[in-house]
Amino acid sequence: MVSRLATMSNETRAGLLLALAALAGVLSENIAFLKPSYDAILTTYITLSVGDAAISKPILLWINDALMAVFFFLVALEIKKEIVEGSLSEWRKAALPVYGAVGGMVVPAIVFVGIVGIDSAEAVGWAIPAATDIAFALGVLSLFGNRVPPALKAFLLALAVVDDLAAIAIIAVFYTSNLSLAALALGAIGLAALLGLNLSGFKRKAPYVLIGIFLWVCVLKSGVHATLAGVALGFAIPIGKDREGRSPLKTMEHGLHPYVAYFVMPIFAFANAGVPLGGLTIADLTAPLTLAIALGLFLGKQIGVFGFAWSAIRLGLADAPKGATLLQLYGIALLAGIGFTMSLFIGTLAFAEPEYQNAVRLGVLGGSIMSGVVGALVLAHASRVPVARHGAANRVPAV
């Protein structure tokens, strides 16, 4: 067992740990002797105070507001790197994942609203199935090794980056309420300080982090979701090399990635995946909100990503992924329907009521599992077919 773990890729290990953490959360909520401790831990309040100023939250919200700010900080670092010098730095490289990501956001939202109704109370959750969980998706994809062309992994990575950027914008615009102008003003001072450091060419990391913590507190108190402070800090970190020839952005990204992959995301999964299964009925599984999320992820994502990407290639708007077949591209589109972490997170912002939260968890788990299993089966079948049998007609058409 240890030797097998040692030979796994980082993506596979991270995806496996995330799955085990989610399973542990479900079991903890449904095993009688574990449930009281699980609930007690997540509802225990922790208070941090400096003089008369204090922040007091249950552990669940410390996870969702503080630990997830670290996750979004890493996401922003990765997005900035890809925009400056990576897969999104040139339009011809970025075009296909951008079109795929647009389809992967628009179509799931349409499926969701079509099921719950545009005038329903549940319609506020339209963005839940529009997200892709890159850790799970890459974990499944890595199982196929070199049997899947590298261009498809690059496509999935870039699509997830664009997807995350869109999710950040959605959270900022649609899931913000009860604004505090005083806190926003202080946050603006923090943003200005970060911008000043960046424009002046300052590359020491500590001042950025200290201002980022101040910004997080201000955003937390402002009514804007606190994770957006992590996004602002990530974009402020300079990517250029310092006097020692190291990029602050790349150094922080490299150092932070294991902690996010092996600690932050599993802790979030454990805390947020605990859906009670006792007394679960067919009616619960087919409730409009549950069904809308599950089908938005499973059907909406695959139709949107594959349909928009294929259309962009056929119309000459984007380059086809080198060496890939239509079936492999379809398999990747299915994997994009694994929306676990970000979908659950948006669900916590859209709905506060327990009955809605349970429906969100069921929908996200159901849609993500279906997308992962069917995507893996499609890629496995595509990998078994010899290249000679695919033929030119089955290749993604190059334009």
Image: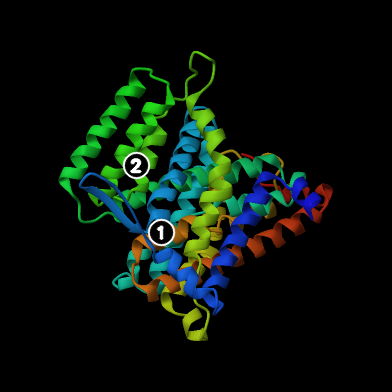
Residue 87 placement (x, y as % from top left): 55, 34
Residue 304 placement (x, y as % from top left): 51, 57
- The quadrant the C terminus occupies is top right
Disc 1 secondary structure class: helix
Q: Residue furthest front?
A: 51
- The correct choice, above or below, for 316 with respect to 366 in the image is above
**What residue lies at 52% left-to-right and 37% top-to-bottom?**
94
The residue wearing badge 2 is 229
Which coloring applies here?
A: rainbow
- N-terminal of the pair, mark 2 or mark 1, is 1
Q: Residue furthest top?
A: 243
Query: Looking at numbered disc 1 in the image, what kind of residue is underneath it?
Result: Ile
Q: Is residue 341 visible?
A: yes
- The quadrant the N terminus occupies is bottom right
The residue wearing badge 1 is 59
In the image: residue 308, left or right of residue 330: left
**What residue lies at 54% left-to-right and 31% top-to-bottom?**
86
Q: Between marks 2 and 1, how big is the CA–CA gap?
A: 19 Å
Q: Mark 2, mark 1: which one is toward the viewer?
A: 1
In the image: residue 51, left or right of residue 69: left
In the image: residue 143, left or right of residue 31: right
